[in-house]
Image (tube, rainbow, N blue to C red):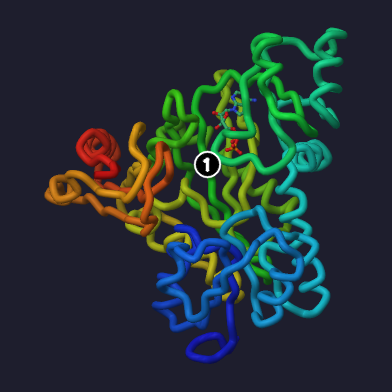
Amino acid sequence: MGFFSTTKTIGILGGGQLGKMLLNTTRQWDINTHVLDPSAEAPARIACNKFVQGDLMDYQTVMDFGKNTDILTIEIENVNSSALADLEKQGVKVYPQAKVIEIIQNKCHQKVFYKKNKIPTAAFQLFESKEALKDAVARGLVSFPFVWKSESMGYDGYGVKMIRSNQDLEKVNEGGCLAEDLVNIDKEIGIIVCRNPSGETVSYPSVEMEFHPTANQVEYVLSPARIPKQIEKKAQEVALQVSQSYEHVGLLAVELFLTKDGEIWVNEVAPRPHNSGHYSIEASYTSQFEQHIRALLDLPLGSTQNKVSGVMVNLVGSINHKGPVHYKNIEHIMAIEGVNPHIYGKKETRPFRKMGHITIVNEELEIARQIAEQVKETIKVISK
Ligand code: ADP
């Protein structure tokens, strides 16, 4: 062990809000932590023991940073995975492992992985270029409507487009991609699984994600999800199957579709803390961030049960506002019982940028959901 109040170090690749929230636990437990991020104003900078500014995709930068850590983890998946594989060879414990990051960095590899491991997922076809996809459409091998997904660097829906016509198809980016069957979605749910190096595995109850109709970003996360017991059971089984297949260490956020036919299909995963687990800071016995640190250190994993119901609202920049941020009406929402704001510390707002989140806790999920709507209508992320 030896990480508590010593110089043994956890390194985090990425210093955004997820890194900042991980640091609550390393601060609480007095664990030495280094952070690497390209931005001098990274939110996590204020809470780590050492901050290094540098490019997460650059091999040498990641090697130099990783060499000075005992355990290396990520809070964003766009990192140089060759460096991670080499650091593993040099004895650094990289969690999630480089092999897991390599698969999830590429949506095509991820889908092939599910197929190989007999994990239920929407049917798909792979294409090495936009031209190849257009050719398949012209030959009738792919028909409208379908979902186009770029193989790499997708984030918050930017690498995903509904394709209903040739005009839509023209607009997608160049590069390797996949065409996926459109799923008849009833609900989008998420399950966070956590696994430590000894193989102990725990999972959180399902959460329900409600999306913003135009921005394709999660607007509300409800915990627990409002789904029947047998669906919850099925979803948990699928999430565990995914976790066992990856053999990851640390958190694995599994995004699932509940179809109108009552099926559970895997959409994608993120092997790190996830937006869908922020509610756990206030609503669960063990937050996802503490759970991740427990797993990295091969400690016993904590209870994933809810203490109360929780609803999380993302605080994103208002449209037409760009510049120094101001949280209008924050004092009004704080007058409401059970409202917990988290401000990430990004100085500049822009439309739809994730600037913070608010978790509303209540014994009754429906009441928390109503308050969440009130919160959303009241607080505005603007620039003055
Ligand atoms: P990202 O990696 O950008 O988050 P996702 O693969 O999660 O992209 O897709 C973003 C959203 O697009 C999903 O949450 C869902 O609402 C919608 N979506 C993705 N795949 C499908 C599909 N096959 N059928 C219907 N909707 C989909």
**Which one is nearer the viewer's eye here, 90 or 191?**
90
**Vertical position of residue 303 compared to residue 246: above or below:** below
The residue singled out by tag 1 in the image is 190
Question: At 81% from the left edge and 12% from the top edge, which residue is drawn?
Answer: 137
Q: Quadrant of the N terminus?
A: bottom right
**Which one is nearer the viewer's eye here, 103 or 317?**
317
**Which one is nearer the viewer's eye here, 273 or 207?**
273
Question: At 38% from the left edge and 40% from the top edge, which residue is drawn?
Answer: 222
Residue 381, position in %: x, y?
29, 43
Q: At numbered mark 1, what does the secondary structure look like: helix, strand or loop?
A: strand
Answer few, some or many: residues within 10 Å of disc 1's Cα (few below 14, many 20 plus, some between 14 and 19).
Answer: many
**Vertical position of residue 22 compared to residue 171: above or below:** below
Residue 55, position in %: x, y?
64, 62
Q: Quadrant of the C terminus?
A: top left
**Which one is nearer the viewer's eye here, 294 or 237?**
294
Horizontal side of 135 relative to 218 (left or right) equals right
Residue 155, position in %: x, y?
59, 41
**Vertical position of residue 290 compared to residue 340: above or below:** below
Q: Is mark 1 within 8 Å of ligand 1?
A: no
- Three-letter amino acid code at the position of disc 1: Gly
Question: At 23% from the left edge and 33% from the top edge, which residue is drawn?
Answer: 377
The image quadrant where one finds ligand 1 is top right
Residue 326, position in %: x, y?
26, 49
Tell me how many marks there are: 1
Horizontal side of 364 relative to 58 (left or right) equals left
Corner quadrant of residue 299: bottom right
**Vertical position of residue 8 compared to residue 205: above or below:** below
Question: At 45% from the left edge and 70% from the top edge, which residue is drawn?
Answer: 45
